[in-house]
Image: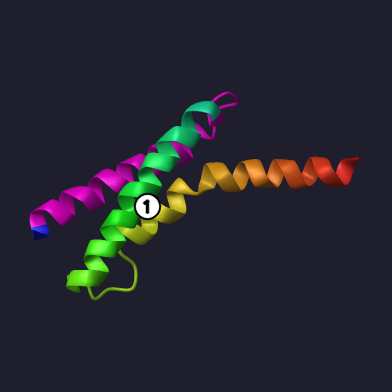
Amino acid sequence: MQKKLKLLGILSVILGAAAALACLFPSGIIVALPIGFVGMICSGIYIFIDTRDEINTNKITPGIVSMVLSSIPVLLILTFIIINRFKH
């Protein structure tokens, strides 16, 4: 079980990092949103299994890191929406 959880943690961090890196490019947000969505699902599963089975006792786990990285595209779009709302 720990090997599967470790693999899921690595996968979720890779997806989160790919979503965050895709936001650096102008048209990358189109690619970053689906990748970030899948990364959030993977990290949510990781956090659920980790919490249920109490495998990691650290406060910062790969699931938390991936959740933060995967949410960057959504936060970026929300920032653009708020900025445009105040301009008009």
Q: Residue at x 26, y 70 (%)?
A: 51
For residue 36, above or below residue 51: above
What secondary structure is found at the residue carrying circle 1?
A: helix
User: In the picture, which quadrant includes the C terminus?
Assistant: top right
Image location (x, y in percent) of residue 81: 73, 42
Check the image and name the residue furthest to the top: 27
- Res. 17 visible in picture: no
Whole-percent x and y of residue 56? 21, 70
Range of residues picked out in magenta: 3-29
**Residue at image point 53% right, 35% down:** 23
**Dominant secondary structure, magenta:** helix
Viewer can see residue 77: yes
Residue 70 in the magenta stretch? The answer is: no
Q: Which residue is mark 1?
A: 66
Residue at the image position 30 percent from the left and 64 percent from the top: 61
List x then y, in percent, for residue 66. Answer: 37, 52
- Identify the image quadrant of residue 49: bottom left
Classed neighbour count for the residue bearing mark 1: other residues with Cα under 10 Å, few (<14), some (14–19), many (≥20): many
> Closest to the observer: 27 or 24?
27
Q: Quadrant of residue 50?
A: bottom left
